[in-house]
Image (tube, rainbow, N blue to C red):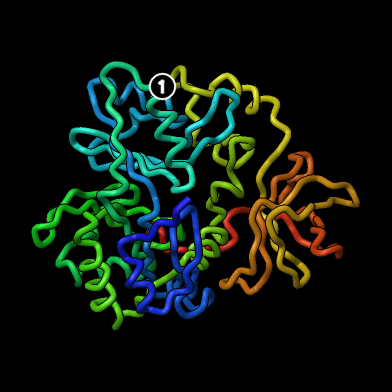
Amino acid sequence: MKIKKTILYENHKSLKGNMVNFAGFLLPTHYSSIKEEHLSVRHFAGLFDVSHMGEIIIEGSNAKKFLQFITTNDIELLSYGKAQYSTICNNEGGILDDVLIYQKQKNYMMVVNASNKQKIVKWLNYHAEKGVNIKDISDEIGLIAIQGPKSIKILDQALKLNLNKLPFYHFIDIKVEDTDLIISRTGYTGELGFELFIPNNKIRYFWNRLLQNGGNMGLKPAGLGCRDTLRLEMKFSLYGNDLSDKINPIEAGLGWLVKFKKGNFIGRNALLKFKNEGKNKSVCIEMVEKAIPRSGYQIFFKNICIGYVTSGTMSPSLSKGIAIGMIDKKFSKTGNLVSINIRGKEKKGKIIKSPFYKLGTMLN
């Protein structure tokens, strides 16, 4: 399969980005260092190219009814200008993708993970009935994210906006210098932040403008490496690690996205069974001993293997190893000491309350 480049590829190269193949796209893991970019987002701001994400328009007279059936969250909670986090499950309750849904004036926009886009487009088309139109607009639109406590000041100054009153998980349709943008107060870092959906022919202009205007406030370009460490410190799930079609939202800690009272939806019966009889639970494990846990490593409680690491890293904010683990929920009590088999050695860790990093400005 041919590897794609985002519109900002040459910008990343000129910034000396370390380019890798991620979900079929060439994207930077880092420009300076993962730790430097991570701390920049926590204390100032970082600018991410997330144009690899897929955008799908769902419209028609039955669009709302269709989304209510396809997703686990309650679409009735949305209104124009609001965004909603949700999951799409199969009949067995396994997660096909975790998605964001934006209610626009005349339709809905669904943002999906790049690695799942083709699968989700196929799934939507398979289930679509009369009065539902599905359109993949991923090749027309780019996405950049500015994240960090200084992000609102940088955006306001650079684009002459006033975003102070935009609440978390809300967005605006706005024209900036004759360009139609969607600016959404969402993100994947735990910090105050925004995501900007921009037509491909204008994305370079806005990327450069933000970097030029934000440099004096500590804004740095940021890559996939710190995107992963930032989200992990918040216990935000990553599809392919913490979520998959073999993992359901209940055990993944996303039970709050499953609204059983709304009526029938795909996976409902299976998820109801998991809610009542499920055996596994996703937990946060903070290492007590110096060690870096990685995906797939086994987790033990008093010599009993109770599960495995779904995501793990060295936390730049906490300077210790952290992991998200999928374990037998009988052993999931906060404070329980566990050990992780790291290259043949048992290293001690402790189950703690989510998230690992508790000083984020996301809701400020």
What is the residue that sits farthest to the left in this orientation? Answer: 178
What is the residue that sits farthest to the right in this orientation? Answer: 303
What is the residue that sits farthest to the front in this orientation? Answer: 2
* Quarter of the rendering containing residue 9: bottom left
- Residue 89, image x and y in percent? 52, 30
The answer to whether 18 appears left or right of 352 in the picture is left
- Residue at 84% x, 47% y: name it: 305
- Work out whether residue 153 can be spotted: no
Q: How many marks?
A: 1
**Mark 1, other Cα within 10 Å: few <14 / some 14–19 / many ≥20:** few
The answer to whether 273 appears left or right of 362 in the picture is right
Q: Secondary structure at mark 1?
A: helix
- Residue at 27% x, 27% y: name it: 133
- Residue at 60% x, 25% y: name it: 92
- Residue 243, image x and y in percent? 58, 43
The answer to whether 24 appears left or right of 162 in the picture is right
- Residue at 35% x, 78% y: name it: 14
The image quadrant where one finds the C terminus is: bottom left
- Work out whether residue 14 can be spotted: yes
- Residue 161, image x and y in percent? 17, 63
**Type of amino acid under label 1:** His
The answer to whether 264 appears left or right of 50 in the picture is right
Front in this rendered view, residue 317 or 208: 208
- Residue receiving disc 1: 127
- Residue 255, image x and y in percent? 55, 35
What is the residue that sits farthest to the bottom in this orientation? Answer: 216
Q: Is residue 117 above or below residue 178?
A: above
